[in-house]
Image: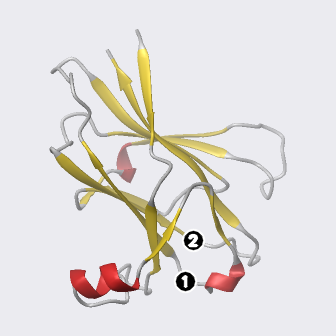
């Protein structure tokens, strides 16, 4: 089975999220005007506050996709993400999690998470990742995000 990877490095947009999981801003226009752009890897440090951060990346659907194609969003993070949505639909319940470095202390371990999005892609897509700071106030990091296409 061949695997083709498309890196979703950037640009990403990030903004703080309130305790209900909603962005602070009320309208899409306000949200877009107040979001800040970033590239991956994105380091979420305690300077951003203790609230979760919403990271958003828009992208077009890959071409050449068939009914037999499996597509996953694969990400490497310093801690498991809170939530992942594709086009507003929760996909993080479909995750396959794994620590890349067994036996490594949690503060230095990285996690690989995969979310099956086969059949959920539209011509234009929005991926939203909710990331929280570590309890100790240390840095949390979204290291990389890829689309993995398997034929």
User: Is disc 1 surrounded by few (<14), some (14 to 19) or many (20+) residues within 10 Å?
Assistant: some
Quadrant of the image for the C terminus?
Answer: top left
* Residue 54 vertical placement versus 33 (above, below): above
Disc 1 element = loop
N-terminal of the two: label 2 or label 1? 1
Near-viewer residue (82 or 122):
122
The residue that appears at 23% across and 84% down in the rendered structure is: 29
Callouts 2 and 1 close, C-beta under 8 Å? no
The residue that appears at 77% across and 76% down in the rendered structure is: 136
The residue that appears at 74% across and 78% down in the rendered structure is: 137
The x, y position of residue 31, in whole percent, is: 32, 82
| Relative side of 18 to 61, left or right | right
Quadrant of the image for the N terminus?
Answer: top left
The x, y position of residue 18, in whole percent, is: 43, 87
Tell me the residue that label 1 is attached to.
51
User: Is disc 2 surrounded by few (<14), some (14 to 19) or many (20+) residues within 10 Å?
Assistant: many
- Quadrant for residue 133, please give it: bottom right
The x, y position of residue 19, in whole percent, is: 44, 86
| Relative side of 31 to 76, left or right | left
Tell me the residue that label 2 is attached to.
132
């Amino acid at each position: 089975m061949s695997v083709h990877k498309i890196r979703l490095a950037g640009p990403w947009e990030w903004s703080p999220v309130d305790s209900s999981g909603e962005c602070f801003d009320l309208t899409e226009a306000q949200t877009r005007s107040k979001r800040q752009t970033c590239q991956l890897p994105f380091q979420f440090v305690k300077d951003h506050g203790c609230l979760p951060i919403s990271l958003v990346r828009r992208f077009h659907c890959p071409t050449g996709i068939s009914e037999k194609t499996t597509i996953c969003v694969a990400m490497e993070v310093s801690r498991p993400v809170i939530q992942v949505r594709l086009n507003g639909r929760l996909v993080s319940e479909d995750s396959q999690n794994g620590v890349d470095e067994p036996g490594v202390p949690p503060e230095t371990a990285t996690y690989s998470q995969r979310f099956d999005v086969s059949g959920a892609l539209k011509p234009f897509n929005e991926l939203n990742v909710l990331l929280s700071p570590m309890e100790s106030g240390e840095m949390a990091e979204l290291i990389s995000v890829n689309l993995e296409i398997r034929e």
